[in-house]
Image (cartoon, rainbow, N blue to C red):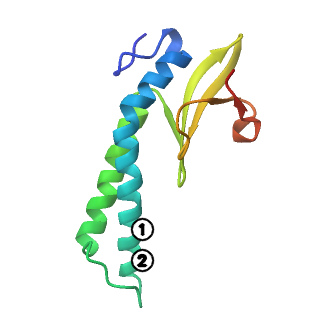
C-alpha cells in the first residue's frame, strides 16, 4: 500500500530512505509549523489580561494561526508519519529494523533523520541509526 506521498511501503511502514525523503519534503511544512506556533504563542500571551501588545494582531489572527496549525499538523499526518510532539516538534515514521517494529524519530533541531526507538519503549529508548 502506498500513501499520499507515495513513500509508504507495504503495511504502512517506511524504509529509512523513504522516511528521510519524506522528511525532506516535509521540512517547509515543519518550518512553517514552528513559525506559526511561535506567532500563536505570542498572540495568546498578548490576549491575556496585562499581556504585551504585539504587531501580529489580535483574536482574529490568533484564531487564524490555530486553524493554520491544524492544517499543517494534518499535512504531516497524511504522509503516514506520526506527529508525537508539538513543542518541540517530534515526528515518528513507522518502520521495521531487523524484524523489530520501530519508529524512526526526528526531533525539532535534528539536522536529519538519524534516530529510532522501539515502539514499546518510546522516546526514552531512542538510539542512533547505524
Q: Residue furthest bottom?
A: 50
Mark 2 to mark 1 CA distance (whole Å) = 6 Å
Residue 92 spot, x, y in % from top left: 56, 33
Under circle 2, the secondary element is: helix
Q: Residue at x 59, y 19 (%)?
A: 95
- Above or below: residue 43 compared with residue 120: below
Under circle 1, the secondary element is: helix
Q: Give the side of residue 129 with respect to residue 28, left or right.
A: right
- Above or below: residue 88 compared with residue 124: below
Quadrant of the rendering where the C terminus is positioned: top right
- Picture quadrant where residue 1 is located: top left
Q: Residue at x 39, y 18 (%)?
A: 3
Residue 120 spot, x, y in % from top left: 74, 30
Could you say which is closer to the camera, residue 32 or residue 48? 32
Q: Is residue 13 visible?
A: no
Answer whether labels 2 and 1 touch (C-beta < 8 Å): yes
Label 1 Cα neighbours within 10 Å, binned few <14 / some 14-19 / many ≥20: few
Q: How many marks?
A: 2
Q: Give the side of residue 57 with respect to residue 13, left or right.
A: left
Q: Give the side of residue 112 with respect to residue 57, left or right.
A: right
Residue 97 spot, x, y in % from top left: 67, 15
Q: Residue at x 40, y 58 (%)?
A: 37
Q: Residue at x 37, y 65 (%)?
A: 40
Q: Which residue is mark 1?
A: 41
Q: Which residue is mark 2?
A: 45
Amino acid at each position: 500500500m502506498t500513501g499520499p506521498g507515495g513513500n509508504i511501503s507495504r503495511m504502512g511502514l517506511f524504509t529509512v530512505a523513504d522516511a528521510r525523503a519524506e522528511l525532506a519534503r516535509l521540512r517547509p511544512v515543519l518550518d512553517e509549523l514552528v513559525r506559526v506556533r511561535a506567532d500563536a504563542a505570542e498572540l495568546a500571551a498578548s490576549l491575556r489580561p496585562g499581556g504585551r501588545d504585539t504587531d501580529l494582531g489580535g483574536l482574529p489572527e490568533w484564531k487564524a494561526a490555530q486553524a493554520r496549525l491544524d492544517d499543517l499538523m494534518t499535512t504531516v499526518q497524511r504522509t503516514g508519519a506520526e506527529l508525537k510532539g508539538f513543542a518541540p516538534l517530534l515526528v515518528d515514521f513507522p518502520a521495521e529494523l531487523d524484524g523489530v517494529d520501530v519508529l524512526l524519530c526526528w526531533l525539532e533541531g535534528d539536522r536529519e533523520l538519524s534516530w529510532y526507538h522501539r515502539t514499546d519503549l518510546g522516546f526514552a529508548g531512542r538510539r542512533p541509526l547505524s
